[in-house]
Amino acid sequence: MFKRLALLSATFMFVLAAGAQETKKFMLVIHGGAGTINRKNMTPEREREYRAALEQALRTGQAVLARGGSSLDAVEATVRFMEDSPLFNAGKGAVFTHEGRNELDAAIMDGKTRKAGSVAGVTIIKNPISAARAVMEKSKHVMMAGRGAELFATKMGLEIVDPSYFWTERRWKALQDELLKEQQPQASLVTADENRFGTVGAVALDQSGNLAAATSTGGTTNKMYGRIGDSPIIGAGTYADNETCAVSATGAGEFFIRWTVSYDIAALMKYRGLSVQEAADQVVNKTLKAVPGAEGGVIALDRNGNFATPFNSEGMYRGWIGVDGVPHVEIYRD
């Protein structure tokens, strides 16, 4: 009798432990831009820098999720880290416009409530992703742009910096190279992919089963004044819905806007019953690939922790990390 009770008790405790373990499922997936990224164009030193930065970004967000933090907190913290790195085209590492300015865009979305916030064309906000979250949580709006967004961020107590903070020699040289091309007879005005597709993003699933997405960018080198890409456009470069998935995109923004890339992935899951992998592949490697110039990729994560990182360019900085705390980073196609 006592042995039977002990066995039942042990079984009950095992079930409880298994249930507790199940509630701890969480996942974080990131990207740092897509384009012509291959081994022959990457020095070993630069590759090590990128891998180290991507791994640290993953650990930053994973630490939030591991202690029971929200997916929103995780994607914001992760993107803030990448905004502070001069390696990526976001925040500190932003590229320059034709006029020699750094104009930044960012967006964040909560999959539980489908609330969203974004900022566009800002020049003095140190971390645009935090400004986007402030728009979502502390205003009645979804998007704020330019001077208005900067005034709002200032009133919200966010860190404001002099525009010179965003200056880096590498990005300035990239602009000069593009301006020089314009002066050459019959010169190609196509910008190097590394600058065209520079964006950072994160999608996360927290222990409560909620999804979130965040994206931040400096846009494209030599872009025209006031140009806004897909990153701050909800449904284009950023989207999250607990019923389907969270998505952050990187690529040729004008195409990602016109094809509403992020929402299209969610819609294929919702209305056609595709998996996150099937839906993301359909949009990136079929729909977009059929359109000349529509290069780039996405990271997409569903409510069960399944994720996809398809891209139709030569490479994409990407990575993921789960409960085990082991960061996985990939750069090239092979």
Image (cartoon, helix red, strand yellow):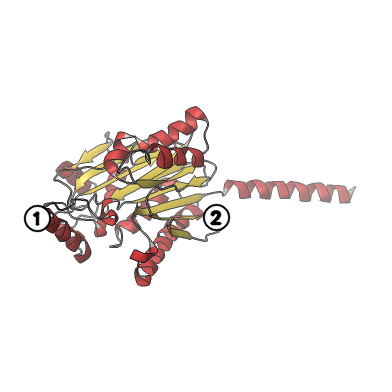
- Identify the disc placed on residue 256: none
Secondary structure found at label 2: loop
**Side of 131 relative to 183 (left or right):** right
Q: Residue furthest top?
A: 271
For the residue pair 57 and 87, the one nearer the viewer reads as: 87
Label 1 SS: helix
Q: Which residue is mark 1?
A: 183
User: In the figure, 66 relative to 136: above or below?
Assistant: below
- Position above or below: 211 against 220: above
- Where residue 77 sits in the image (x, y, percent)? 37, 54
User: Residue 307, relative to residue 317: is it above or below?
Assistant: above
Which residue is at a point 18% across and 43% down the rendered structure image?
Answer: 227
Residue sitting at x 12%, y 58%: 180
Q: Give residue 254's quadrant in the image.
A: top left
Residue 6 locus on image (x, y percent): 82, 51
Residue 24 visible in rendering: yes
Type of amino acid under label 2: Val
Circle 2 sits on which residue?
323
Along the viewing direction, whichever of 214 and 187 lies nearer the viewer: 187
Q: Nearer the viewer, residue 48 or 182?
A: 182
Q: Residues within 10 Å of mark 1 (few under 14, many from 20)?
A: few
Q: Residues within 10 Å of mark 2 (few under 14, many from 20)?
A: some
Q: Is residue 29 left or right of residue 167?
A: right
Q: What is the three-letter code of the residue carrying label 1?
A: Gln
In the rendered image, residue 240, in percent from the top left (x then y), is placed at 41, 39
Residue 65 locus on image (x, y percent)? 48, 52
**Would you say residue 233 is visible in this rendering?**
no
The CA span between labels 1 and 2 is 53 Å
